[in-house]
Amino acid sequence: MIRTSLVTVPNRSTLFLAKAAIVGMTTFVAAHAILLLTYATSRQITSGRHLGFNEVSFSHDLPVLLASGMSVTALALVGLGLGAAVRSTAGAVMSVVTLLFVLPGIATYLPPPWNTRISTILLPSLVPQIAGQRLSSRLGDGFLAPWAALAVLLAYPLVALAIGYYQLKRKDA
């Protein structure tokens, strides 16, 4: 469909930035709506029973919910950027799966302190750090300040979109 898109919008910069804006806004709104709705529904279902996850207030969980929504948005933009770079939907999906599941698994087998240093900057570890929570005990003392974790989270889509933009401008459809 890239040829059809480029016929409709011949300026590749405009096309790519419009796609990024639509993906970003749609994902941001949908992710936050789904997360908040799921959170509220789970609280209603458990209504008074203490099950571990529902023992804290909404205001305590709000930073994690907001960070999770931002993380989903970042992943969608990473997928868009990598999809434009490799020109393959399957390649983009595989890249995102690698970022989410393969690299964190490999990082745990690195020798200390590298396992902690690398794990703290990988996508699955950024949400709790943005919310100001300590990471799991398997990562030891590795911890980024919330502003630093947010900066790393924002760097993922920025780098992926820059690579995708460069590849889209450089290659033919």
Image (cartoon, grey):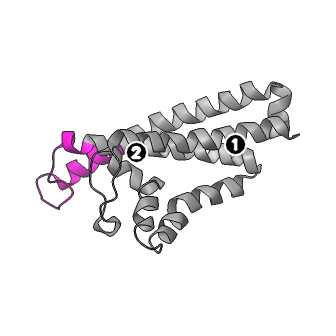
* Residue at position x 17%, y 61% in the image: 52
> Does residue 37 appear anywhere in the picture?
no
Tell me: residue 34, above or below residue 55.
Answer: above
Q: Which label belongs to residue 120?
A: none
Q: Earlier in the sequence, mark 1 or mark 2?
A: 2
Q: Classify the position of the N terminus by image quarter.
A: top right
Q: Is residue 13 left or right of residue 56?
A: right
Q: Secondary structure at mark 1?
A: helix
Q: Position of residue 82 (x, y in %)?
A: 67, 48
Near mark 1 (Cα within 10 A), the count class, few <14, some 14-19 or many ≥20, is some
Give the Cα separation between the discs numbered 1 and 2: 22 Å
* Residue at position x 40%, y 50% in the image: 126
Which residue bears the numbered disc 2? 149
Q: Quadrant of residue 151?
A: top left
Tell me: residue 86, above or below residue 146.
Answer: below
Q: Nearer the viewer, residue 63 or 45?
A: 63
Q: Which contiguous range is marked in magenta?
A: 35-61
* Residue at position x 39%, y 46% in the image: 68
Q: Secondary structure at mark 2?
A: helix
Which residue bears the numbered disc 1? 163
Does the residue at mark 1 contact the one at mark 2 (Cβ under 8 Å)? Answer: no
Q: Classify the position of the C terminus by image quarter.
A: top right
Q: Is residue 69 left or right of residue 6?
A: left
Amino acid type of the residue that numbered disc 2 sits on in the rendered structure: Ala
Q: Position of residue 67 (x, y in %)?
A: 37, 42
Among all residues in the image, which is located at the extreme front? 113
Q: Position of residue 8 (x, y in %)?
A: 82, 26
Q: Nearer the viewer, residue 21 or 149?
A: 149
